[in-house]
Image (tube, grey):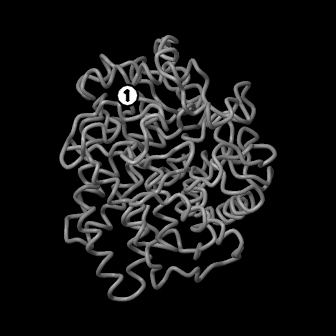
Amino acid sequence: MDKPDAFSAPVLIQDMSADLWNSATVVLETNWAHDHMVPSRRLYPHQWSWDAAFTAIGLAYVNPTRAWRDLRSLFEAQWPDGRVPHIVFDPRTAEGDYFPGPAFWDVPAYGRRAARGSTGLVQPPLHAVAVWEVYRRASAHGADCAHEAGEQLKWLYPRLVAQQDYLSLHRDAAGTGLASIVHPWESGLDNSPSWDSAMAGVPADMNLLVRFQRRDLEVADAAHRPLDIDYARYLGLVLTYRDRGYSDTDLAERHGFVVECPAFNAILAAAELTLAHIAAVVGADPRRHVERARCITTAISQRLWDAESRTFRSRDLRTGQLSPARAINGMVPLILPGLPEDQAAAIMAEAASPRFGLPETTGLPVPSFDRTSPDFDTLRYWRGPIWINVNWLLRRGMLVHGYRVEAEDLRTAMIRLIEESGHYEYFHPKSGEGIGAPTFSWTAALSLDLLADQAVPASARAT
């Protein structure tokens, strides 16, 4: 076990629940695996990309050494083209313990990474935000800690830039200034109704489920997981992308799923704004990051905004159509300070409406999908349940745009939910019951950040 850092004790905590703090640290200790954090031991026994970002934000309070190690471990698996894989496989974990595992992805060796060491997909690039949060906390605790944090920043900065360049250049499939995702798994919101219309055109080869066995249903309730027809489409998309060498050339013309997601691109822009802060520390030019963030924000505002419903929606590049679904990814652009205020106000109105419901009316954080839709599902993954990570992002956006009362209500609701139900992967949107994997890392990590909130003014936070 790593030696505790000198500043790992919970300090400056408002309304702290000692039991919740302690249980969260136990989860993070339980899920540490040599040089990285797993989301949960049974269901997700490898390292996930955006999980590592959320987890580092919480680890910064109790073990920043591990926060840095987890992030570095992820970026040590970065591809030569700059992509950061959505899963980095642990060679100590047997192939049969997770599907789709290394053999299915069949990624060739690259750099110092052995063959089949990762997947070929990506996830939302929240890592720059996480790096900056870890740096801010570490640099405030003496010269030695600040020096170490500065060295970590220097190592990570060019790799974060390469990640952004990959997404902004290779994945701008339509030439619109927005990154496209080529698989629902890349969004982090795997089976969200936001993808239903685009996925309807993807062939569902059910024979794939005969050739390959779903491991998730052996360790999780089938009622909580994506349907078989969804999984068949997921596997088909991976095989198509894999068999073309994970190439991003002419995606919109030849790949079955190419979508611009408002949440993914909002995080991409937020990462650029944060890289401007990091650049200033490491001696690089921050201006390119500020300009790129401005361009992405403008493109989101113009391309993914549905004026009729006053919501952000994902756009299917195969058809050019916006998704009809009102899902949580349409609220994440609130994290961008450059978002027009009328659009920010519309997001808040959507969050407060009966379709979602803020804690003031429901007593709970915001669900992942429209409560009033006939497709709303209280149990199935991203089709209704409450997730802490996207609520954490929504709260961050509220602070950015000055909705401080609503942000505090949401913080309190998240803390209360985790206190009462535990560190679950996600939660029932009506009862608050924990669903999915227990002892889930990002829920534990973000509960530490929520407990340790120091009410930093929105203008002082890097987004």
Q: Nearer the viewer, residue 333 or 16?
A: 16
Q: Residue at x 60, y 36 (%)?
A: 327
Label 1 amino acid?
Phe
Q: How many marks?
A: 1
Q: Residue at x 70, y 52 (%)?
A: 365
Give the image quarter of residue 289. Answer: bottom left
Q: Position of residue 63 (x, y in %)?
A: 47, 73
Q: Is residue 250 above or below residue 444?
A: above
Residue 189 lies left or right of residue 103; in this view the side is right
**Residue that label 1 marks:** 104
* Secondary element at tag 1: helix
Quadrant in which the C terminus is drawn: bottom left
Left or right of 195 on screen, residue 272: left
Q: Is residue 73 above or below residue 96?
A: below
Place residue 354 in its image quadrant.
Answer: top right
Q: Is residue 337 above or below residue 321?
A: below
Where's residue 374, x and y in %? 74, 24
**Residue 435's x, y, as percent?**
70, 44
Mark 1 is surrounded, within 10 Å at the Cα level, by few (under 14), some (14 to 19) or many (20 or more) other residues, namely: some
Q: Report x, y in % for residue 26.
A: 60, 66
- 150 and 440: which one is in front? 440
